Amino acid sequence: MLRFGLKLRLIWSHMSKACHRIAASAAEQSSIEVERETGATRDFSQRGTNDRIEWRADALATMKTALAIYPGSFDPVTNGHLDLIERGTKIFDRLVVAVLRNSEKDPMFTTAERVEMLREATKQWENVEVDVFDGLLVQYARQRKAQVILRGIRAISDYEYELQMALMNRKLEPHIETVFMMPAEAYSYLSSRLVREISNLGGTISGLVPPTVEARLKSKSQK
Ligand SMILES: Nc1ncnc2c1ncn2[C@@H]1O[C@H](COP(=O)(O)OP(=O)(O)OP(=O)(O)O)[C@@H](O)[C@H]1O
Ligand SMILES: [Mg+2]
């Protein structure tokens, strides 16, 4: 009886090892197939350094340079916009801040002034370019060969409008993705409109806009 029990346990242990081997090899096979089909990132934690170097070379060979467009009226640029631009520079290879020409009938700053302020405020980031566009955003993005439209979400109130715009842009151009980013909490209430209003009413705007913009706002408001 004791011998029979021992034999049974030995058979069981052989069977379970064999099953594990079959399952492991099937899992490896299927994960390789998934990788082949999807180009998914492989888990190299169990493999050698050479594998990792090989994978990196593979990935770099197929990696696209991501160009994102950050559109807006920037009338004027605020520290909230700059917070978003800085975040964008870390994710995308190139970021084009695109000023919408004639976005409002009566903007506070001319397009040239808005571009000038943006260039001054973003000169520290080498991968940022400031440009002007009019007409359809997706047309401009297509022309620039951009893959991404970057937009900021401050609060739920932004969400509805931004969602509508993003879905409409996707309908017009399915190859361009809209990416939303959130600013630091300190800027989540900040908008160009508020800055213009405060400045017109003689309030202080320091800390809300770059110093050069603050000076320009003061001189505009005194006129
Ligand atoms: N403080 C901020 N934090 C994050 N995103 C922002 C901030 N201000 C603006 N954005 C985003 O930047 C993009 C361009 O916005 P826009 O030029 O209209 O600025 P705005 O501050 O909303 O100006 P306005 O008040 O004149 O509409 C939008 O996606 C907007 O949501
Ligand atoms: Mg706005």
Image (cartoon, helix red, strand yellow):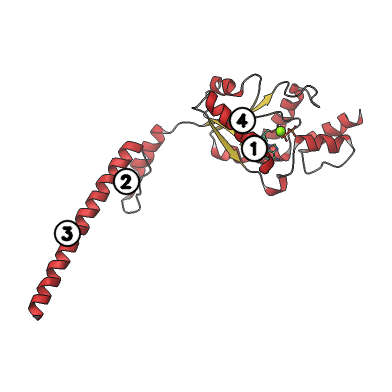
Element carrying mark 1: helix
- From the viewer's perspective, tell me whether residue 144 is left or right of residue 159: left
Q: Is residue 128 visible?
A: no
Element carrying mark 4: helix
- From the viewer's perspective, tell me whether residue 91 is left or right of residue 36: right
Say whether disc 3 or disc 2 marks the residue closer to the N-terminus: 3
Q: Which residue is mark 3?
A: 18
- x, y percentage for residue 90? 57, 40
The numbered dot on residue 50 is 2
- x, y percentage for residue 117? 74, 30
Q: Toward the viewer: 218 or 10?
A: 10
Instruction: Quarter of the image for the N terminus: give it.
Output: bottom left
Q: Which residue is mark 4?
A: 165
Element carrying mark 3: helix
Where on the picture, by quarter, is residue 189? top right
Q: Which residue is mark 1?
A: 160
Q: Amino acid at mark 2?
A: Asn
Say whether disc 1 or disc 3 marks the residue closer to the N-terminus: 3
Say whether disc 4 or disc 2 marks the residue closer to the N-terminus: 2
Q: Is residue 86 visible?
A: yes
Q: Amino acid at mark 4?
A: Met
Whether the residues at callouts 4 and 2 have beta carbons within 8 Å, the answer is no
Classify 163 as above or below 100. below
Tell me the CA gap for discs 4 and 3.
56 Å
Tell me the CA gap for discs 4 and 2.
46 Å
